[in-house]
Amino acid sequence: MKEIIIDIGSGNIKAYLVNARKEIKNIYLKNIMFKKNFSKEKGIAEEDKKELMNAIKEIKNRNIGIPIHAYATSVFRMLNKEKLEELQTEIIQATEIKINVLSQQEEEKYMAKAVGNLYEIDEPYLVCCVGGSSTEMDIPNTVWQAYEDLVKMGYDKYNTKKHKEL
């Protein structure tokens, strides 16, 4: 079975066709600088929303009958709950496609999985994805993942304690 994945970042939209053998082909790319016109109060600019919906419709019309999954990252995480729900409703009404917004942690996890564990490398390695409005980093080795989680937990406890002292 084929399916389409739409990746909406802070500066572009990419669509990938995934075939039954899980081979991935880039089938669409459009630059829309969502972050340039973004504001906390208004969210995604109206013109950018229109371009986004038109891009999704174009992808959908070129691939009739193929299931489509869409996710957004980066600047879309900055939307407050109300603005995000409004945007998702508008897009569903216009395209019948729901856009899920990934947390930074989810994006890190999926990015590391996309690279995969490189078994020929014995030492831990860092996977880094520098995007238009965010940077995700992960150490995909499971042993080091536990270590990384402990470091984060210790860091959080340290920061919490320090903030309480202030």
Image (tube, helix red, strand yellow):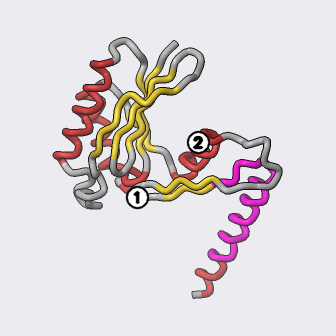
Residue 99: percent from left, percent from top: 38, 36
Classify residue 13 as left or right of residue 90: right
Nearest the viewer among 140 and 46 is 140
The amino acid pointed to by label 2 is Tyr
Residue at 68 percent of width and 71 percent of height: 155
Q: Helix or strand or loop: what does disc 1 sit on?
A: loop
Q: Is residue 100 above or below residue 92?
A: below
Quarter residue 7 falls in: top left
Residue at 43 percent of width and 47 percent of height: 73
The C terminus, quarter of image? bottom right
Q: Helix or strand or loop: what does disc 2 sit on?
A: helix
From the image, give the main secondary structure of the stretch colored magenta. helix
The amino acid pointed to by label 1 is Ser
| Residue 4 forms part of the magenta stretch | no
Check residue 133 in the rendering and tell me which mark sits there, or answer none.
Answer: 1
| Residue 145 forms part of the magenta stretch | yes
Check residue 110 in the rendering and tell me which mark sits there, or answer none.
Answer: 2
Q: Is residue 90 above or below residue 165?
A: above
The boundaries of the magenta stretch are 138-160
Classify residue 23 as left or right of residue 59: right
